[in-house]
């Protein structure tokens, strides 16, 4: 056999072997990253659950327990058979609307399969996180061509954060510690609807990859996914449409007359068809329901300061700038998507309205992919790229480690934001069994956060957004438990029961309790019938 033929055959076999080994290495790296990620979002919860003793019970939430308990309250609404959301932290009741259907649906499922609501919440959280990882990997395969750059992007996106740990030195508490929807790790650590929403958003950006040969089934898949995204994360639909609009302008300029032939425009149309009706319904039901209107006015999420944003996204944001020239050099549609998403997300973040921060949804993802490209541009060799990627991980993982350590510390100390006493749990069980479903409980702000999720009963105050006229109600409830006798009759006559536990006693002393009949008493908690006869 001639040398050239032999050499060509050998080279072909080597190329195939190298490709196979590269694929295996990629899978190995991804598998290790996924394993680390799953351990990060599960082990602290397992530790916190077993850290309770005879006196304390883990409440189920390690990040943002205020919102976490509100999700539990929504699940209770579904568990008792409701299909509409009504504000669980407001004494008054209105018609409500078909909102927060994931949690209401989980509540129904918990009742049907007879599973504890908290257990189902975390099963949904972990399952949604796995779906998000699969969608993220698919997204990066679409947007990043080089395998080693894609692996770096996947790794830093999944386990990374910002440099908020530096801000802590100067007394700053930046967004990368608590704005969960912006970061895949925090999203998965907090709840199920953030990672599931991110998964759907990433899917819409990259589905399908068949160019212009799409069937009607493909288009209707986009409609359905957009509809579900609208139910989970309405602002995700707005973000997707805004990004696709930016991409369309870039692709069509200067011949906008070709917009009918644009695949991006047509995809945007079907996303609009699936998602926007959900947004219109949300606006309608919120505006026509008086209590939901108050909730909407209180539900303000302004953007972080520029210093906060720079720390929260550094050094990823800086490295992403080095990745921008690659977008214009290769003109890859995937890289264009990364750049447009980054720019649109950052611009919308400072759009002048009250809900700016909602547009931080997933902003870490395109920035990380651009940053990996920028890192590849800076590095002169594969070894240098590996070293720089490792150094980057060292810089961006401490914030997440601090989040985990804070969780473990809170669990070890039985922080009352994370734990309930056994006496409180027993009292909640008594309320659930022995009071009417429409009963109103007067409790401290901290207990008011917990009672709807554990008993399904409403409270005078319990949540900064989901209590109507929250500021006024909070002030009155705090003053009542601090001993303001002038509020005694006014508040007690609005409630059916007065809850007096360790959180209430920590605020002060309530007057005229001897006038109230005791209906439940334990070493930790006393419950009174609330009305005072004139």
Image (cartoon, rainbow, N blue to C red):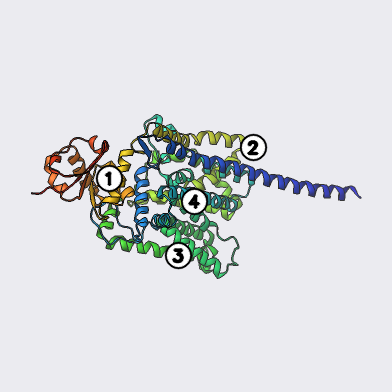
Q: Earlier in the sequence, mark 4 or mark 3?
A: 4
Secondary structure at badge 3 equals helix
Distance from the alpha carbon under mark 4 to that under mark 2: 38 Å
Residue at x-position 52% and y-position 69%: 260
Mark 1: few/some/many CA within 10 Å (<14, 14-19, 20+):
many
In the drawing, what numbered circle is on residue 380?
2
Which residue carries the number 3 mark?
A: 274
Distance from the alpha carbon under mark 3 to that under mark 2: 46 Å
The mark lying in front, picked from 3 and 2, is: 3
Secondary structure at badge 1 equals helix
Mark 2: few/some/many CA within 10 Å (<14, 14-19, 20+):
few
Up-down: is 230 above or below 148?
Answer: below
In the drawing, what numbered circle is on residue 128?
4
Secondary structure at badge 4 equals helix
Q: Earlier in the sequence, mark 1 or mark 2?
A: 2
Which residue carries the number 1 mark?
A: 448
Closer to the camera, 341 or 19? 19
Residue at x-position 89% and y-position 47%: 3
Distance from the alpha carbon under mark 1 to that under mark 4: 29 Å
Mark 3: few/some/many CA within 10 Å (<14, 14-19, 20+):
many
Closer to the camera, 384 or 114? 114
Residue at x-position 14% and y-position 48%: 490
């Amino acid at each position: 056999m001639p040398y050239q033929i032999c050499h060509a055959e050998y080279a072909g076999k080597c190329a195939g072997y190298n490709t196979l080994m590269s694929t295996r290495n990629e899978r190995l790296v991804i598998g290790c990253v996924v394993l680390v990620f799953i351990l990060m979002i599960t082990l602290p919860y397992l530790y916190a659950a077993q850290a309770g003793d005879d006196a304390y019970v883990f409440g189920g939430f390690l990040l943002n327990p205020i919102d976490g308990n509100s999700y539990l309250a929504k699940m209770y609404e579904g568990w008792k058979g409701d299909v509409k959301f009504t504000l669980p932290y407001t004494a008054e009741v209105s018609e409500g609307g078909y909102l927060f259907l994931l949690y209401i649906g989980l509540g129904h499922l918990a009742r049907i399969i007879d599973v504890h609501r908290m257990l189902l919440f975390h099963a949904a959280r972990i399952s949604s996180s796995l779906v998000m990882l699969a969608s993220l990997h698919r997204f990066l395969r679409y947007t990043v061509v080089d395998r080693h750059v894609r692996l770096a992007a996947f790794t830093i996106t999944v386990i990374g954060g910002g440099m908020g740990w530096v801000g802590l030195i100067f007394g700053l508490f930046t967004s990368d510690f608590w704005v969960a929807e912006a970061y895949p790790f925090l999203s998965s650590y907090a709840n199920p609807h953030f990672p599931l929403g991110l998964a759907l958003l990433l899917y819409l950006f990259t589905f399908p990859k068949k160019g212009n040969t799409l069937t009607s089934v493909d288009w209707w898949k986009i409609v359905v996914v957009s509809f579900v995204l609208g139910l989970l994360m309405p602002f995700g639909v707005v973000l997707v449409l805004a990004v696709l609009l930016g991409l369309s302008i870039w692709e069509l300029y200067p011949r906008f007359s070709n917009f009918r032939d644009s695949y991006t425009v047509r995809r945007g149309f079907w996303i609009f068809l699936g998602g926007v009706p959900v947004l219109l319904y949300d606006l309608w039901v919120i505006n026509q329901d008086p209590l939901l209107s108050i909730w909407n006015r209180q539900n303000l999420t302004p953007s972080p300061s520029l210093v906060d944003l720079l720390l929260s996204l550094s050094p990823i944001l800086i490295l992403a700038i080095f990745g921008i020239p690659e977008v214009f050099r290769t003109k890859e549609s995937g890289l264009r998507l990364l750049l447009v998403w980054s720019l649109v997300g950052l611009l919308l973040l400072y759009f002048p309205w009250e809900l700016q921060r909602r547009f931080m949804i997933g902003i870490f993802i395109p920035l990380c992919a651009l940053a990996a490209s920028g890192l590849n541009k800076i590095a002169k060799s594969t070894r240098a790229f590996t070293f720089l990627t490792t150094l980057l991980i060292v810089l961006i993982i401490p914030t997440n480690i601090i989040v985990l350590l804070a969780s473990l510390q809170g669990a070890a100390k039985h922080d009352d934001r994370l734990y309930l006493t056994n006496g409180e749990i027993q009292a909640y069980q008594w309320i659930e069994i022995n009071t009417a479903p429409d009963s109103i409980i007067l409790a401290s702000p901290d207990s008011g956060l917990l009672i709807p999720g554990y008993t399904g009963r409403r409270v005078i105050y319990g949540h900064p957004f989901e209590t109507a006229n929250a500021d006024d109600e909070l002030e009155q409830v705090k003053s009542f438990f601090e001993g303001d006798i002038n509020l005694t009759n006014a508040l007690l006559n609005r409630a059916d029961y007065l809850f007096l536990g360790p959180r209430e006693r920590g605020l002060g002393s309530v007057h005229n309790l001897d006038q109230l009949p005791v209906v439940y008493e334990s070493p930790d908690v006393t419950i009174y019938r609330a009305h005072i006869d004139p």
